[in-house]
């Protein structure tokens, strides 16, 4: 550093400080012993806290000091932006521990070191990918990313509900657009990077990078074009592409979960993905993200579309909810937008349980909604979720949330004498329909559709006959 100069005097090495540094040192040396002791104690405490912050993501300092201070000092959106900036600039802590063997899970033939991911919505523009991986997540999902830049909904659009351990947001897909995120993803690649079947877009062994694809607010509501454009843009730079048709904050988006529209959409993105494979050796998985507010018929439509459109590799269950349980007590409980956090958990669990009974075993489910502890995570595994994602708890607990939940989950698994993979496999065996049942159900559905088509044709002919002159 410019303020330090090494000089040798009489064969002895000493450090000569620049004038401003010498004055600071002299001030300490000339101070009273008590003041000098206080300064040195403060310096040692600051250095210790800095070391703990950076090298120990498990430390209580993250959960009980840093996160609450930021949350009370800034409004929710500003604190969100600050957290992204800290991780983007490599100022966040690191999870220095090796994941326990009990946490390993398998997804599409890839062994992940742990099943815990960060959901889309935190890093909307791919700015903090490596900072999030450094916190120990096994799956980092960025976005939603829309084809064209858009500002999203007016502020304020994020509300903390600490009394309910919840959050309401109505961001509305604020996005820098495909071009900006694409350039950022390319900048992550090593100078001599070459894509092969063994490479992961995450650039981390045992970790996956997902891109969540959104739809511009001004795009035609029933058009799949924005999602197809997203697949074509990011296919070579993602391990997973997520088709998000479930945000409650974009008008008309959830209507794409209806059976006919969804089948049309999924066929379009599968075709785009398959065409992209011809230009790159990477074959990203296609995953659908659904709403927790679907009724039984809606869940049936999702299962049907995923089963009929071959090439959909998984489902994320769920996004935020528009429901407001009666027990919410926060003053912000009536704000419009999607509710996440603890009140979402029972809805998400029910949706996972219901969909797992309808999807073939080879189609994994990623559980998301209100997970804030190892016990919560294990509950999702027991109803058949192969992986889970965090969102709201990460905002409340800060950088140590992932490691804390991994540690709690490890303890729960050790107490039961089992592993994450064993719990998931048992749940899938007990709940997923067999191959024969799935094929038989599909045949019944196709036959019913053919019968309905014949009835429609018959009704049309009868109408023409009735209108024709005698």
Image (cartoon, rainbow, N blue to C red):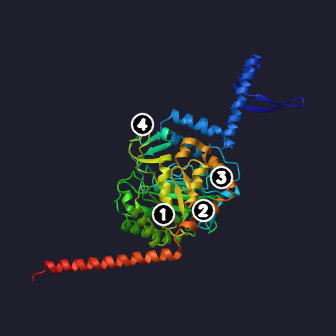
The answer to the question of whether label 2 and label 4 lie on touching residues, with beta carbons closer than 8 A, is: no
Residue 398 position in % (x across, y down): 58, 42
The answer to the question of whether label 1 and label 4 lie on touching residues, with beta carbons closer than 8 A, is: no
Quick one: label 1, few (<14), some, or many (20+) residues within 10 Å?
many
User: Would residue 348 appear left or right of 64 to someone viewing this image?
Assistant: left
Residue at image mark 2: 424
Q: Earlier in the sequence, mark 4 or mark 3?
A: 4
Question: In the image, what residue occupies the spot 60% across and 55% down?
Answer: 378
Marks 3 and 1 sit apart, C-alpha to C-alpha, by 25 Å
In the image, residue 349 above or below residue 11: below
In the image, residue 276 above or below residue 57: below
Q: Earlier in the sequence, mark 1 or mark 2?
A: 1
Residue at image mark 3: 412
Marks 1 and 4 sit apart, C-alpha to C-alpha, by 34 Å
The answer to the question of whether label 3 and label 2 lie on touching residues, with beta carbons closer than 8 A, is: no
Residue 78 position in % (x across, y down): 49, 39
The answer to the question of whether label 4 and label 3 lie on touching residues, with beta carbons closer than 8 A, is: no
**Is 186 in front, or is 232?**
232
Quick one: label 4, few (<14), some, or many (20+) residues within 10 Å?
few
Residue at image mark 1: 355
Question: In the image, what residue occupies the spot 50% across and 66% down?
Answer: 357
Looking at the figure, which quarter contains the C terminus?
A: bottom left
**Is 319 in front, or is 238?**
319
Assign a secondary structure to mark 1.
Answer: helix
Residue 192 appears anywhere in the view: no
Q: Earlier in the sequence, mark 2 or mark 4?
A: 4
Looking at the figure, which quarter contains the N terminus?
A: top right
Residue at image mark 4: 331
């Amino acid at each position: 550093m410019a303020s330090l100069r090494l000089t040798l005097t009489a064969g002895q090495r000493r450090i000569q400080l620049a004038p401003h540094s010498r004055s600071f040192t002299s001030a300490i040396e000339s101070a009273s012993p008590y003041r000098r002791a206080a300064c040195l104690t403060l310096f040692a405490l600051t250095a210790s806290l800095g070391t703990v912050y950076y090298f120990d993501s498990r430390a209580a300092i993250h959960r009980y000091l840093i996160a609450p201070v930021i949350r009370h000092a800034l409004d929710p959106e500003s604190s969100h932006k600050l957290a992204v900036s800290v991780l983007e600039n490599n100022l966040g802590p690191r999870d220095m521990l090796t994941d326990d063997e009990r946490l390993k899970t398998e997804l599409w033939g890839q062994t992940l070191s742990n099943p815990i991911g960060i959901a889309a919505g935190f890093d909307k523009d791919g700015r903090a990918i490596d900072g999030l991986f450094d916190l120990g997540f096994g799956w980092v999902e960025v976005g939603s990313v829309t084809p064209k830049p858009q500002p999203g909904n007016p502020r304020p659009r994020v509300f903390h509900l600490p009394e309910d351990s919840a959050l309401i947001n109505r961001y509305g897909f604020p996005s820098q657009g495909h071009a900006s995120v694409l350039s950022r993803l390319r900048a992550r690649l090593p100078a001599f990077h070459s894509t092969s079947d063994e490479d992961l877009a995450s650039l981390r062994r045992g970790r996956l990078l997902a891109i969540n694809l959104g739809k511009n607010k001004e795009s035609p509501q029933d058009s799949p074009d924005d999602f197809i454009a997203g697949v074509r843009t990011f296919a070579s730079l993602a391990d997973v592409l997520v088709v998000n048709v479930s945000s409650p904050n974009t008008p008309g988006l959830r209507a794409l979960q209806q059976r006919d529209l969804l089948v049309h959409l999924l066929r379009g993105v599968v075709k785009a993905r398959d065409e992209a494979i011809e230009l790159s050796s990477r074959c990203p998985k296609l995953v659908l993200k659904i709403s927790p507010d679907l009724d039984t018929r809606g869940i049936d439509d999702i299962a049907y579309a995923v089963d009929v459109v071959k090439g959909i590799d998984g489902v994320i269950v769920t996004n935020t909810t528009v429901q407001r349980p009666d027990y919410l007590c926060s003053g912000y409980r009536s704000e419009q937008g999607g509710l996440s956090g603890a009140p979402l958990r029972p809805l998400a669990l029910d949706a996972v349980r219901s969909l797992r009974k309808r999807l073939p075993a080879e189609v994994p489910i990623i559980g998301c909604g209100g997970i804030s502890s190892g016990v919560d995570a294990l509950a999702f595994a027991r109803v058949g979720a192969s992986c889970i994602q965090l969102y709201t708890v990460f905002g409340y607990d800060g950088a140590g949330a992932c490691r804390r939940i991994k540690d709690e989950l490890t303890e729960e698994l050790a107490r039961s004498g089992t592993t994450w993979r064993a719990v998931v496999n048992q749940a899938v065996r007990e709940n997923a329909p067999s191959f024969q049942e799935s094929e038989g159900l599909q045949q019944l559905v196709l036959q019913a559709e053919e019968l309905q088509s014949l009835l429609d044709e018959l009704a049309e002919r009868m109408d023409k006959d009735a209108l024709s002159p005698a």
